[in-house]
Every structure is written in C-alpha cells, then in structure tokens.
Amino acid sequence: MEVSRVRALRGPNLWSHHTSVEAIVTCTPQEQSIGELAGFESRLRVRFPQIGGLQPFGHYETIPLAHVLELVALHLQAEAGCPVTFSRTTATLETGIYQVVVEYSEEDVGRQALELAQQLIDSARNDTPFDVQEALAQLRATDEDVRLGPSTGAIVQAAVARNIPFRRMTEGSMVMFGWGSRQRRIQAAEIDATGAIAESIAQDKELTKKLLDAAGVPVPQGRGVTDPDDAWAAAMEIGLPVVIKPKDGNQGKGVTVNVTTREQLDAGYKAASEFRDDILVERYLPGHDYRLLVVGDKLVAAARREPPHVVGDGQHSVRELVEQVNLDPRRGDGHGSALTKIRFDDIAIGTLAQHGLTPESVPAIGERVVLRNNANLSTGGSATDVTDDVHPEVAARAVAAAHMIGLDICGVDLVCDSVLKPIEAQNGGIVEVNAAPGLRMHLAPSFGKARPIGEAIVDTLFKDGDDGRIPIVAVTGTNGKTTTVRLIAHLLTASGLRTGMTNTDGVYIEGRRIDSGDCSGPRSARNVLLHPDVDAAVFETARGGLLREGLAYDKCQVAVVTNIGSGDHLGLNYITTLEDLAVLKRVIVQNVAVGGMAVLNAADPTVAAMAEKTRGEVTFFAQDVGNPVMAMHRAQGRRVVFVEEGYLVAAQGSIVERIDLKAVPITRGGVVGFQVENVMASVAAAWGVGTAWDAIRLGLKTFVGESDNAPGRFNVFDYRGATVIADYGHNPDAIAALVNAVESMPARRRSVVISGAGDRRDQDITQQTEILGAAFDDVLLYQDQCQRGRADGEVIALLRAGLSNATRTGHVEEINGEFVAIDRALSRLEQGDLCLILIDQVDEALAHITARVKEAA
C-alpha cells in the first residue's frame, strides 16, 4: 500500500463540510480485499481493538486496505480525544487507486494520525510490534502543542455558537473573528480595542497603584527599590510584613509574600531580580487571594485562589504528596489543562524552609503544607468560584480599576478576608491588575460553578445580532466566471460597498490590483477576507483550489454557477465526467448560508439540478422566459431573471424590474449572447446581496467591458476600420459562445488567432478548431508560452487536426510566438474585417494590441 499526495482540505470541500486530510492510496491486487491477507484483521484488532466494525452492520462488501487506513486514522484521533467523526474511501477509475478522506480537528494531528495508521497497518501485516498507547500519546502531545489553549478556545467556541466565523492568525493564540471591515481580533484574553498604553500601564505595578489610588481604589502602600538595603529601608517605612516583587512581572513570577525578616527579604529580592531589574516593595495584606474578572463594564467572574499545597496523611513525605497530587488528570504541564502541576523547585523548597520543613518531612494527618506564597494557577494553585458572593461595592471597585487603567478585559487581584463586604471595611486592597488574564480558573474552577467567560468576551466584541460577516459572493462554472465576478464586484461598488475581488487575473481591493496571476483559489480569498477595508467580497472559485484546499470560508451569502461544460480540465485529479465536475462545482451551492441565495443557470440542466442541494433560496436565470424550470419557479413566486423584448427582466411575484439592454454596454445592445448571460447572473447575485436597483442600473451602465475593467473578456478594438476582439476563451464551450457572438457582427472577412492549453484533453483541443473552421476564413495557429506538460508542437498538431474538415477556412498559418502571431494577423486586416484573437498572456497581449492600435491611429 502506497500513500501519496496528502492534502489538507481546510474548508468545505468535495467530500464534506469538515476540515479533512485527503490522500491518494494505491493498493496491490491482493490489498484490494483484506480477505486475501491471511490473519490481517485479527492481528489488527489485537493491536487496536478500538477500531470497531470495518463496515456497517449487514454489509459484506469487499474491504480494501485503503478503507482500513481511513478507519484507523479516524479512530486513532478519536481515541486521542479529538472530536472527529467523518471519513470516507472512494475508488477511482484506476484499478487499485483510492481517495481516502479523514476529518481532523487540528491539521498536524490529522497528518500524524494518517502516518501512524499506516505504521499500524504495516505492523499488523508483518506481525511486528506496535505500541498503540505510545501512538496515542504522540497524538495527544501534538494536539496539546497546536490546539488553542482553554482561554482562547472558550472564546472561539462562544463565537462559533453565535455563527461568527474565526480564523487562527498564528500558531499561538491570536485569532480573527468576522471578515473584512467587520473583523475583530484577540490575543489570548486581550482584544484589539485595548491600547498598548493601557497594557504598558498594567505591566508597571507602581504606576498602576498610583492611578488606582487616584481613582479611590484601595491599594497597599509601597515603592520601588534599587537594592536589598533600599528594599529593607522601604520595608521599615511601610512596616512588616511586606511583599517584594518585580515591578512589571506576571503569573506570580519572582513574587515573595509575607516577608518578616531581613533574610527573607534578601532572598525575595534575589528571586525578583531574576525576572526584572526594577523591584517593588509594598505592604503585605493578610487575607484571601481573589481574582476578579472584568469584561467591558461588568464583573463577570470571581474566584478565590489557593496557593499550591498538600495535606499530610502521616505516612508520605512532602515530595511524595506532591507527586500524588500531580497525578490528578486535571493537572498538566502548561496552560492547556484545567490545573497545572505543582512545581517542586527551589522556591517550593524555600517556602518549606520558612516553616521549618524539608521535602522529606512527613506532615501529620490533616496538616496543610503550603509550597508557595502566591496563588497563581500557573504555579500549581487552585481556584474556587465565588462570583455569586461578590458585594456590589467590591464589583464596582474592580470595574473602576479596569477602567482607570484602560483595559477592556482585566484580571483584578484583590486581597481581603471576604468578598461579601466592601474592601474598605476590612482593610483589604487591590494589589495588581492584569492585561490578558488567564481564564481557566473561571472556565473550569477547581471547585464551584464554571462561568461563561467566552460568551461575555464575544458579547463585548460583537453586539447582539452581529455575526461579523460581510457579504460573500462565490462564482464558479466553466465559462463566464471572470466577467461575472468583475461585474458583480462593480455593481456592489456602485452601491457604496468597498469590494474585494479574486479572479484568474489577480486580487483586487476597491478596484486596485494588489496581487497578479491566477488568484482564483482559497489562499487569495482568505487574503481578501483578512483585509480591513473590505465590506463585501466576490470570489471566482476554480476547480483547482476546491480540490486542493476546499473553500476559504464556511458559507457564502450568494453562490453563482454560470454553466457546466466539457472543456473544464476533465481528466485531471479524478474529475473525469461532467457529473464529477458538477458535484465539485456545486460545493459553493451546498455552502450557501440559510437565507442566502443560489443563482443558477436554468438553461443548463446540470446547473439547474443543483437547486436541490442548497440550504438557501434560488434565483434562476435564462434568456428564455418560457424555459420550463423558469416558468415553474416564477409561478411559485420565486426569483427569476430573463430577457424579454430587448429588456433584462428581474421578477419575483408582483415585483418586476426592467433594464434596457441598450444601456448595458458589454452586451453590445443585447447582441452578444454570452455577455447577456453574464449580466443576468450578475444582476441576480447583486439582487441576492440586497443591492438597490438604482445602483444596479448605474453599475451596468458604467461597466463597459474594456480591457481596463474586464481584461481578456471580449475586449473590442477598432484597428484601421477593422474590428479586433481579444478574448481568453480556452475551451470548446467558450469558443462556441464567441463564434455565436461574432457571427452577429458584420464583417467583410473573418480571421482568428488561436493557441491551445496543454492541460486539456486531446479532443477538447481539437474541438476548438473544429468549431472555428466553420466560422472563419483565416486561422493563425501559435504555440503559447507554457505547454503545460505537452511536447513541443503537440498542441499545434492537435489544433491543425481540428481544421482538417473545415467547411469555411481556406488559409491556415502557423506562427511561433503569441505576439508575432498578433502582429501578423493585424498586418493582414483591411477595413471592414473582423479578427478574433484568443490570447494566452492576458495582460501582456492586451498591452501589445493596445500599443498597435495607438500606432495605427
């Protein structure tokens, strides 16, 4: 069994809505049925009994080894604690070759699970050892490394529950919620509205105290110190006991509390100096350590924190008791678990020494032994939820502290005997405020009720009813995609929306190209959604990107399918039939949001059938209003767009909008049929987004189809009285549509310049010139810049073969080079002629033609 071409499908894809790993798996004839592998299944189950059934109950089909790989990879992840449920194995038309798809929750874990599954299967085949528990431990370790921590994860889960899309921006905890101009960002428990100055203030403990004191918030007296002697002097001024800590520390690092002697102070100063040069000494406040969490203008959670400690049993040493406590499955090594393992380090040993104990001391039964003088969870402490006990005055002081510093999310550290009464009444004080506070003590407290912190933060980021989404229009099909994308973007721009667009020419933001080349894949779409100046997005969605990664988003507001034709790369990546192609293209239709709109070509039965697959509404378009699909749809009071007496008509029930095609330049008065179809699809899409009809009319009038706003899409030039048309048509359906368009235009003599894309099937390349041979007097063949895997001259030979039975073409010429061919065709034109140039290098060829036109003027 050979596993190759492993891909991560990072969005909705051909197989499912789930993120998945896809692999091509080649099985030998014997491996195409595990029944031929003597003893394999029993050896597999000994090694991995959790595998379960290899096929649904009651089925007895042949099971290929590829299917076993699928199930093992899925169940390894499930056993490792990953929430995955979907997998699939599909046989290709090539005997013994399968496509295996397995869901993942974290991409690295999914890839690793596939590798471990192959190793496990090899072990069962060869009867060699395989440690399943070690494999599961590897997967858990990888998952721990790459997944979001509990704080960020809780915020993400709350956003997902509100239908707010998210995207992880780094391998750490920076996450973007929403799209484009409506996006918000967080870094752990810090939101984008929090200023750098507020964060800097929170890190400066001395400045924080001054500000809180000015706001009337109780704080302990203290000051910065320069050396141990100065620290002791400060302690004498304040009065023992004191706390010594770094001026801008975090997570309790370098903090020593309840200092009562010079020796303790010197040791504390040394510990603090290991983290920062600036040291602070302040009055020690007796009482419990509380963390109050403020989000926005509300106190949303409170916890009483206990320092790491053990309770004696009269038999085990302190060291042994710590080891027992750390066996608690809730305790981990980092912030990914509910609790952190107690650190048995020099600080812990020093704390024991303060109480006359050593690591080998055996505490009496019930004796509480504290191992640190601070209660941070990151050092092994625990937390008890006390949110319901907080006195309103205490909550008000915490909110005032957060606002004085300028923090939108703030962890306020309070020391007092109880939160049941005001701070001033018990000589307590706020000792610290924290930007980006840890949330796990509130999400999963050691004792008490968990609090919905993620929901509170998301509610601060997005008002009720706001899902952070911008309108996304996805466009796919065989022909007309790019023009349709450009026109939809133009219509949305005319309505006042700042529009981002991707197509085969590049990435555009508000009409300005920021990237060039074929940008019809998910990477470019993700970049547009990342841009803060985008109010709406229009994406050309090509087959290659869908197969390679899936969609760049979870759902779109409008999906447009122009048509499905035979020339769209059939035979590549196991998409071999029109039915296969339709299943792939309808992915965007399947992922229309509830309440969204699928815009479908009613004249194309394959496209029209996609209406059954959408969760949204459907708008059908076709030039013929008498089309049965259109007629039925309209009779049901649903949306249709059609042509009637020279007008484009959009109708739904009693609502009817009419647009004169003479006012739509790219249709040349309604004569260019394929452009009329592109306009109908675009109008339906803009209607689906909710664009005003005045804006639609204005957009149609100002979209002239010239090379500056629709390059390579039926760009018309006047050259010395001859008509020159440049187009990127590159498959039989496109060629047929172009022929139909130019035949409606008068001409004395017709010529065409054409090459062929090497990644098409032989019959698709040949069919192009078969069509042209019946419509043009002269044909100039040229070899384009990239043959896409074809041998030199192979494409030209196929094109010439298509002209062998031409009914009209009399002159055929072969030219080496696209620009040489263009110049040759232009030099032969006379007034009244028409020349169709099928360009390959769109921008360069259009610039070349434009220059020649200017020279001839």
Image (cartoon, rainbow, N blue to C red):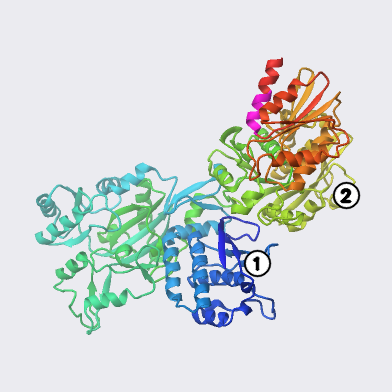
Quadrant position of residue 349: bottom left
Q: For marks 1 and 2, give the one nearer the viewer.
A: 1
Task: Please provide percent x and percent y for residue 408.
Answer: 42, 49
Numbered disc 1: secondary structure? loop
Query: Which quarter of the figure is the C terminus placed in?
Result: top right
The spot of residue 654 in percent (x, y) is 84, 44
Image spot of residue 721 (x, y percent): 79, 18
Q: Splitting the image into 4 quarters, where does residue 352 fall?
A: bottom left
Q: Can you say which quadrant of the picture contains the N terminus?
A: bottom right
Residue that appears at 87% across and 43% down: 624
Which residue is depicted at the point 23% across and 75% down? 319
For this view, does 439 lie left or right of residue 341? right
Q: Amino acid at mark 2?
A: Ala
Q: Earlier in the sequence, mark 1 or mark 2?
A: 1
Q: Which residues are magenta?
A: 841-849
Residue at the extreme top of the image, as rendered: 857
Q: Nearer the viewer, residue 758 or 832?
A: 758
Q: Would you say residue 41 sits in the magenta stretch?
A: no
The answer to whether residue 108 is visible is yes
In reply to whether residue 847 is colored magenta, the answer given is yes
Find numbered disc 2 in the image and state the secondary structure of the residue it sits on: helix
* Label 1: few (<14), some (14–19) or many (≥20) C-alpha neighbours in 10 Å: some
Residue type at the position of mark 1: Gly
Position of residue 37 in the picture relative to residue 306 (left or right)? right
Above or below 495: residue 271: below
To which residue does mark 1 refer? 96
Mark 1 and mark 2: Cα distance apart in space: 47 Å
Query: Looking at the image, is 265 positioned above or below residue 602?
Result: below
**Magenta stretch mostly in which secondary structure?**
helix
Q: Is residue 296 visible?
A: no
* Residue designated by label 2: 631
